[in-house]
Image (spheres, rainbow, N blue to C red):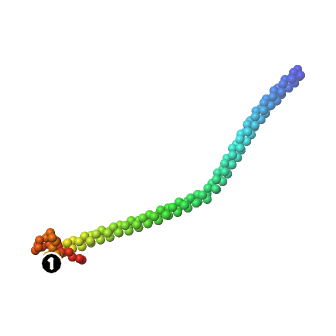
Amino acid sequence: ALLAEARAAALSAQEEVSKKDQQLVALQDALNSIQFAMERTQQAVGERESRMQMLQGALDQTQPAMAIAKRAIEERDMKIDGFQVLLGALEEAQMESQKALEEAQAMVAARDEEIKMLRDTQPPTQDATQQQPFTQAQAPGATNTAPPSRTL
């Protein structure tokens, strides 16, 4: 009976060892999975850091070009502002010239009107026949109807 109990105890211990071995195998599989996941994570982190370094290098290389482009844009803007000021000055000068031209035209028109009025209101100082000799189309003794020419 003792032997039967010892066999039963040995069988029970063997089952316990078998269960422990199965748990150990399951734990080893879990550990392997975790290690694989960690390796993949470290690989992904390494790739990300590599890309970050590459992007930082590209950014470092583009900084001088960006500064040059920014300066070029600022210079262009300054030229545009200068041209706008110049354009405004030219427009103002053109308006002043136009005003002066209109004033000069008005003065010329007023002088022409004064001259016309003087011609219309002053009687001729000489006889028209004495001033200009008659042409063949005019009969002797006929008067010239054209106003006498005067220089101003």
Residue drawn at (47%, 65%) of the image: 82
Quadrant where the image shows the C terminus:
bottom left
Task: Work out whether 3 lies above or below 93.
Answer: above
Q: Which residue is mark 1?
A: 130
Q: Position of residue 56 (x, y in %)?
A: 65, 53
Residue drawn at (16%, 75%) of the image: 133
For the residue pair 107 and 116, the one nearer the viewer reads as 116
Left or right, 146 with respect to 95, comes to left
Task: Work out whether 101 lies above or below 35.
Answer: below
Q: Position of residue 149 (x, y in %)?
A: 20, 75
Q: Tell me the quarter of the picture where residue 16 sits.
A: top right
Q: Position of residue 134 (x, y in %)?
A: 15, 73
Q: Tell me the quarter of the picture where residue 112 sits.
A: bottom left
Kind of residue sitting beneath label 1: Gln
Residue 40 visible in image:
yes
Residue drawn at (13%, 77%) of the image: 127
